[in-house]
Structure formats: C-alpha cells, structure tokens
Amino acid sequence: MGLCNCDKDILKIYLDSETAEYDSEAVGKYSYSIKLPVKRQNYKKLVLFVDNLNIQIKGLANLSYLVNADIIQYNSYNSRSKGSNVILASIFTNASATGRTSDFALNYSNSTAPIQIQTIPEYLNITITDIDNAGINFSNADNMWNMDLRIEAYY
C-alpha cells in the first residue's frame, strides 16, 4: 500500500492510553511519537478528523472529559485559552456516581467535523481534562481510552 493516485493522502493515527511513550496517568497526560510510514512533503491543506474516541470510566466520577492536543488548529478560537483551540473532542457523562453499575464507557464519533491544522504532527501530546481544566486521573486499571484520528492531506 502506498500513496494514492488522487488529490489527497489519507493518514490514520490510532492512539491509546496503554501505549504512550511517556505518560503521567495521574493527571491524564500522554505523549506519542508519530511515525507515519509514508507521507509527501509540502501539502497545501491538512484536515484532521476525530473518527472515534472511547473512554472507559468505571473508576471515575468526572462529569466532563475534554481531549486537549498540542495541534495548532488553523483559524480557530477557544474561550479558555483566548487563542487557538486545542480541544479535539469533548464528552459529557449521563451518570455521575462512582457506585453506578452501568454507563462505564463513553463514546464519541464525529468523522464529519473537520479540524484544519497546519502541520502533520511528528510528536503529539494529549491531555484529558475536565471542563475546569483539571487533569483526570486514569491511573486506576479500570480507566483507559483510545482515539482514532484521520488526516486528509491535500496536495
């Protein structure tokens, strides 16, 4: 499988909480070295999509989960940072009690929401916080997440 004979390349990135090169799970921070096997240089436009995000929250009682990434989103604004948006996805729970017996998994699927970015990341830092920007503790073995990203790279 190589580059397609079309006007764009599609690059897929899968990340999960268990395979980070560096993590500080107690505050929801993860770092990844992104090693895409094939990519061109000098793309004219890069569009990122969060195809899927799954969070297992059996041991958590947070009401909100925001996925922050150090990807500069072109022509965006975030009221918290007063600058470019760094939030890739946000999920709010239906249940908020730690003693619950269901609603352990949160799912986000939004493959049609484009995020225009400026570069293909070679290194990516992900932080999962609540709505008040406090890091979420994923160090319990029952808590984990995964995310499937797609970059449409136009040339």
Image (cartoon, rainbow, N blue to C red):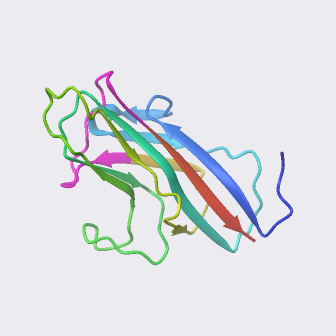
Q: Position of residue 53 (x, y in %)?
A: 44, 45
Q: Position of residue 74 (x, y in %)?
A: 49, 74
Q: Residue furthest right?
A: 5
Residue 83 part of the magenta segment:
no
Instruction: Tally the marks.
Output: 0
Q: Which residue lies furthest to the bottom in this view?
A: 75
Position of residue 53 in the picture relative to residue 80 (left or right): right
Q: Where is residue 137 in the image (x, y as percent from the top left)?
A: 26, 34
Position of residue 136 in the picture relative to residue 20 (left or right): left
Is 142 drawn above or below residue 23 in the view shown?
above
Position of residue 83 in the picture relative to residue 43 (left or right): left
Residue depicted at 33% across the width and 21% down the height: 141
Residue 133 part of the magenta segment:
yes
Is 25 drawn above or below residue 92 in the view shown?
above
Q: Which of 22 and 130 is in front in this view?
A: 130
Query: Magenta stretch: dominant SS?
Result: loop
Give the quarter of the image for residue 140: top left
Residue depicted at 49% across the width and 65% down the height: 113
Q: Position of residue 49 (x, y in %)?
A: 53, 59
Residue depicted at 52% across the width and 40% down the height: 15
Give the quarter of the image for residue 62: top left
Position of residue 79 in the picture relative to residue 113 (left or right): left
Give the quarter of the image for residue 81: bottom left
- The image quadrant where one finds the C terminus is bottom right
Q: Where does the magenta region start and end?
A: 127-145
Is 45 drawn above or below residue 144 in the view shown?
below
Q: Which residue lies furthest to the top in this view?
A: 141
Q: Which of 95 and 70 is in front in this view?
A: 95
- The image quadrant where one finds the N terminus is top right
